[in-house]
Image (spheres, coloured by chain):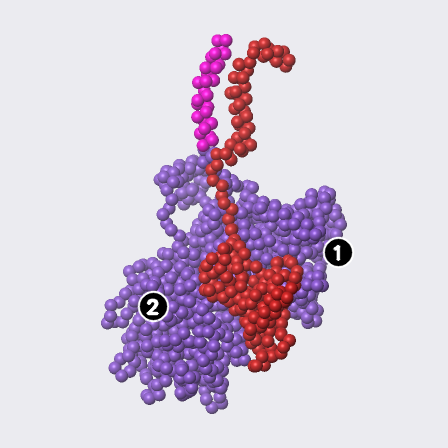
Chain colours: A purple, B red
Amino acid sequence: MLIAWRVLKAVVAVSSVLSGAQALFPDEAGRIDWYQAQIGVPQRLEEHVHNGTVGLVAATARNVVALVDAESGALRWRQQLGDEAIGALQVRDGRVLTQSAAVDSAAQVRVWDADSGALQWSFTHAADDVSGGAAAFVDDSDDVVTVSGNQLVRVAADGSTAWTLALNGTGVYGRVVVHGGSVFAVGDARRTRTAGRRLHVVEARVATGEVVQQYDVADGQRLGNGRVVVAASRTHGGFVVWREKKNIVWQLHRLGQTSPLWEMHHAKHVQMELMPEDMLSSTLVEAGAADAPRFAMAYTKDGVAKTLVVELVRGGDGVEMRRVALVSDRTDGVAWRTGDETGEARKGRVAYRRDTYGPVTGVTVCSGAARVVVQTRGGLVAALAHGRREPVWLRDEALAHAQDMAFVDLPAPASPAEHAARATDPSVLPSPFARFVLHWVAWAQTLRAWALTGFGLRRSAATAPPAGTESGRLAPEPLAAGDHFGFSKLAVFGSSTGVVTAVGTQGGVRSWAHYVAHNDSPAAVERVIVTRRSLPVGGEPPVAVAVGRGARNHTVVAPLDALTGAPLADLGQHVMPFAYSRVLELPATDPESGQLLLGFVPVDGAPRLVLWPPTTSAARAFCALTKPFFFEVGDDVGSTRVRGFRAVCPDAWAPDTPPEVDAQPAWSFDLPPGETLVAAARYEPGGYATALQGRVLGDRSVRYKYINPHLMTLATQGPDGVAVYLIDRVSGRLLHSATHAAARVDKERPFLAVQSESRVIYQLWLDAIPAAAAAPPARGFVTVVAELFESDRADERTTDSAISSRDLRLPSVVTEAFAAPEPATALAVTRTRARIATRDVLFALSSGKLLALPDQLLDARRPLAPSADEKAEGLLPYAAPLPLDPRRVVSHHNAVASVRRIVSHPTDLESTALVAAFGLDVFFTRLSPSGVFDQLAPTFSKANLVITTLALAVGCLLARPMVHRKLTNRAWA
Amino acid sequence: MLARLLLITQCLLVLAIGVLGIDKTYRLRGTIIPNEVLKDVSQIATRATAIVNGGAQRGFIQSDGSFVVDNLELGDSLLEISAVDYAFPKIHVRISLKEDGDDAAGNGRASVAARFVQVGSEWSEDTPLLGYPLQIGASGKYDFFTPRQGFDIVAMFSNPYMLMVGASLVAVFLLPKLQANMDPEALKELQNKS
């Protein structure tokens, strides 16, 4: 009874906190936030036609199966397959067939409804051999033939197997073709001492699974090498097309045909312009399914990258090739035409810069050639149509592969008059009189613009494109200025496809994109760091540096103008001939370029720091630091030891070599035997800053916060569960540790941690949550809050200044655990300008919700039964579950999928923080954890103000004769 | 009491039939059933998944609401329906081997005992057992928004500032009228008192 009463009190108290929070109004959705539903870079695209509408079914590199409207590019549905890579995709008769498998896991065969995306049925292969994998529909049946490892299986729609054929280890099969009563499994033949590399084909009767024949074909080839492709269609069957190395002749083999075994066709059948040297560098890729087997060839001719789509048609006694489409990727645009030389051709040309999203790598021709969908290596997917100079739609799928992002401040907006003054005579701007005149000129212009729009009554008729798509221009729209509150910034994303994309925080419009390449390959961008934020008087733009891994795992550093995306003229793209393990933002600025210094820790060799910018002035600036600089290595997953180093500058710098700083061992933190590191967390930049050094208790005493900028959280998995260590990054000293028995960390249930001020918040999975002896142990995610204080007594400080890493006294730690409402994929804390406003703790839930809980709920000092002092302090009674209040779900109906990271950034108003969540999807919003105390409330009615003012004015006018009459009467009295 | 025992026995038998053993792992079947909260279950087929033990195992929802989750191990598990728009109860699933031995194929026969649980609460065994295959209905539809209040004349005039303005107007306009209508002698008496 007592417990029930306490729980009731806790619920009431929590409800009061939540109801006081600022909730989202319906008209704010889509206005202060934006959302882009992504699918990832398509690896396979198949056409789906139903009820006259054309869609594209995509299997993507983010393991997503999705249907995209071919007319608008809108996402109709998608299904995420987690970590299962999709190896096969086929669309037939309103059904979508996929075969996918996680690493070292059994292959999953699934059939989806193509219109709704709902699963129809599934089948799981045996897990004994997981190599290869492919599947195909059986003609005129709901059955599927699938191969994985050593077994070829026919599966019915109820999941039962009609037959199973053991393939006896003859090959690793990657394609299945069903045609004419036979099923063909095509794969890489097992290599023997006598036999070299080639493909192996097994033909079996589709009705019984009886082997008809098996043979080798395509000497020297293996699936996926770029010189062989298996093209198939329902009516024509399957073909193997390949080109031998250093040979310009395409060779063709019809599956199952043994007499004659080979058919050869030269490329001149389809492309007279090809020269032998063009052929030698060409690659063959699949190009979707159609009535006839299709494939594509990519080659370069005269510096123009071309993709030729051909299909195989019957001609005379043999098979001939017919050109379906030719797409030419030139330096200034993409030109395309469909049809062969004889038929009616459709064609078009769109302006496109290859340095934005990379070269064109894929072409899919929709039915009737009404649409040609091209995709680039960087992840742009665009639909082109006859006669259009701009794409019908485009999808920036590079964002689905975003690894990091950073906010870039935009300059405050200037009026057109001020712009004109800057352009013509900037010297007038310092004059107060000139600024006064410009102000009123701008005001008049604004008034005129307002009048032209019907005093704000006429609204723009433009309709927003579907989420994740853009209609219109391939070229992004640069955003030159922000707003007066700092709400409008650029969110710069770096993706593993090599593209750095800047998106405006107001509306989510693309501002610029830049493709980072190294040796003709995309450099997988892993970090985006803003190395110059401010806009000095001289007009130097802010700089965003993209750090990625290029060819041979070399480190690529690309500094970009953060407002335009253009590479910096004075500091070009820099390649370091080593793989880096960490990149550090150093506490120094290059005096020449005004940029923040970066330090790269190479993976191999003795620990050291390689400085960027690679100039002597930058190195001197770093070595002029008065405080020693420490860094640590070995905090990767799987490590058993974390080591700290102190940077030591050399006596002299070697000329013409990148400046390097030696490292002197400072400390070593060896994990206990049997434990390996599963996660590490540090403060986000500025995450330790606080406006309050202590917490004022109910009796007006103060408990001082332990705020150590060098605090680091390590989580390890061991035989006894998960251990959490808080260590100091300068001294390596252990500050606090905790062990969670029966806890487990794996890929599906990661350890998440965030450090904010004096708190460390982490979430982990417990297989057995302690319970009463009579009840079985519960399972679930637990959110743990550890709050660090300087002392366990009030009004006691360690020191008057900042915490020193050399101080031997340990913090006093208060911890509490809460039950998480749903699994989370990312954690973060809002960040405001001066840290005066309270904070919201952000949870990206696996269901797609972005939940913002006030940090009052995640207080480790919440008591079971608050005393009078604790009530006066504002502590809430403890309740184990964290509430999933829908009013605190800031992403509302948007399913923000697979969020990898949440980034918060302050605005110019203390009340408001910007929040971006990205992973597969991208979501952005503004949050005001303490309410919008420095802005007009959203409910403020300007109409009421105007009406009241007018009413007062009218009242004064009406009262004036009355008052006048009264005064006159009084004078006569 | 006897009826209850019979019901439990019958339930366990049904559970045993529904669970398939696949190489020491087991398959869990269930269905999201329509109710007053969620009338059309097909609409969440692409916006919800069934997850077990925090995502260690997953199952897709079919258009009729049914789902299967494979690779479950013996013991206790937590089943959740992860959806954006709807709340579903969480379920404690216990898979245990039956004592009457293996089936004809030599696989151990298992039974499922499932109960509703709440986050942060103990997994009590006093909670009633659920039938198998599981039938789960949505417990609520999330309302993410706070309705914005429109123009309300009553609310406007009940504002304290408006009440103060009203009182001032009364003092300015009505009190002199009252004063004028007062008996002169009473007025004089009042003025003398003040």
Does dot 1 land on a helix, a strand or a loop?
Answer: loop
Q: What residue sits 62% from the left and 72% below the top?
A: B96
Q: Residue furthest bottom?
A: A194
**Mark 2 or 1, nearer chain start:** 2
Please give the chain letter of the residue carrying mark 2.
A
Up-down relation of residue B81 to residue A883 (above or below) = below
> Magenta stretch: dominant SS?
helix
The amino acid type of the residue labelled 2 equals Val
Q: What residue sits 48% from the left and 14% below the top?
A: A967
Q: Residues within 10 Å of mark 2 (few under 14, many from 20)?
A: many
Question: Residue under circle 1?
Answer: A809
Decide whether residue A322 is among the magenta residues: no
What is the CA distance from the residue labelled 2 to the residue labelled 1? 69 Å
Residue A743: image x %, image y %?
A: 65, 65
The amino acid type of the residue labelled 1 equals Arg
Question: Residue under circle 2?
Answer: A365
User: In the image, which residues are magenta?
Assistant: A947-973
Q: Is residue A449 visible?
A: no
Q: Are marks 2 and 1 in contact (CB under 8 Å)?
A: no
